[in-house]
Image (cartoon, rainbow, N blue to C red):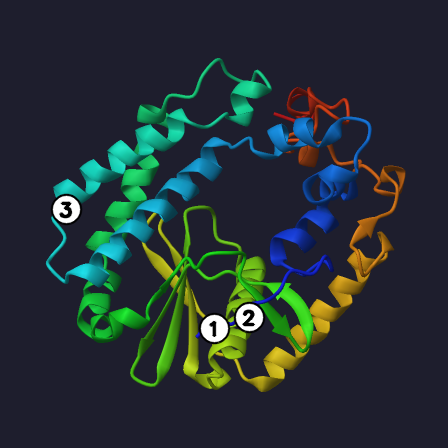
Amino acid sequence: MVRKFDYTPLLGWSISRYDTFKLCKRQYYYQYYPKSDTEFGPTKIYTLRDLTSVPLEIGNIAHEVIKTLLKRLQKTAKPIERDRFLEYAEKKTRDLSRKKVFSEVYYKETDAIDPETQILPRVSAALSNLIDGPRLPWLMEEAIEKKDEWVIEPEGYGECRIDGQKAYCKVDFLFPVGEEIHIYDWKTGKRDDIKHSKQLRGYVTWAHFHYGADYTKIKPTVAYLLPEYDERSVELNEFDIEDFADRIRSETEEMYEYCDDVAQNRPLPKEHFEMTDNLRICAFCNYRELCGRENAGSSVEEDLPF
């Protein structure tokens, strides 16, 4: 049973939060403290925060369709009709894309995004790789017996405690097979062994905290859906988790240093959150307009040697 927590303002560590913190302190400020900004105000910042991009939307849609697929398997183990499944994915792609504002359009990198040519082919390829690969039949044979115990993108942010520290590690899909607990994380982007290995450690600690399972019985896997289906798993023990917990403590304390009030998660004034000097980072930041770096993308292109 997943534990519930009462709200507290104390910041909680997550991979995405700390990665943003290390990438650019000003981006971190806008992402996590929009209500504290008096220059632009939260409404403007929320508008920018909600911008999506073509790569991000490919992943979002693939996750949404896979969630629907897994919930369907919980109701019936009837074989998936491939054509109907991909037709559903096409409709979902059109419906979801139509509701989004793309950063590529907002920042005038292109006039419009065409889901049919820029999003749908990769979504279809990712989902085809999943249903044509070996993992789905394995799920239907080995995991279906305990389908009522599946955890499919649980509500909330995946709050847990890592050695007493507040943290967020939201799993995509957790399910038992025999005495083991398996965790799958779907990826449509490029492989990043360092970052994804860290994510897997977070998922293991989340599962151990909520289910009390032995670390050696928790099997985390990153499933890469593009360009072809591929998996990466890690084997962890208590010593790995102790090192991970120490790292989380250190990273959390780094973020605390930018708080005026740690207990209330109240940030220092914005001027303490310096902007990065790397315009390559700015070129992909939703908030670059607020920093006067709307043309960072073109500046980067001008610097390219060929």
* Mark closer to the chain start, 3 or 1: 3
**In this view of the protein, which residue sits in the foreground, 69 or 121?**
69
Separation of marks 3 and 1 at Cα, in angstroms: 31 Å
Residue 26, horizontal then vertical, whole percent? 78, 39
Residue on which disc 3 sits? 82
Q: Do the residues bearing badges 3 and 1 touch, measured as CB atoms within 8 Å?
A: no
Q: Amino acid at mark 2?
A: Arg
* Mark closer to the chain start, 2 or 3: 3
**Residue at 53 percent of width and 55 percent of height:** 192
**33 relative to 69 in the view: left or right:** right
* Mark closer to the chain start, 1 or 2: 2
**Residue at 67 percent of width and 75 percent of height:** 245
**In this view of the protein, which residue sits in the foreground, 22 or 148?**
148
Q: Residues within 10 Å of mark 1 (few under 14, many from 20)?
A: few
Mark 3 against mark 1, which lies toward the viewer? 3
Separation of marks 2 and 3 at Cα, in angstroms: 34 Å
Residue on which disc 1 sits? 234
Q: Do the residues bearing badges 2 and 3 touch, measured as CB atoms within 8 Å?
A: no
Q: Which mark is residue 201?
A: 2
Disc 3 secondary structure class: helix
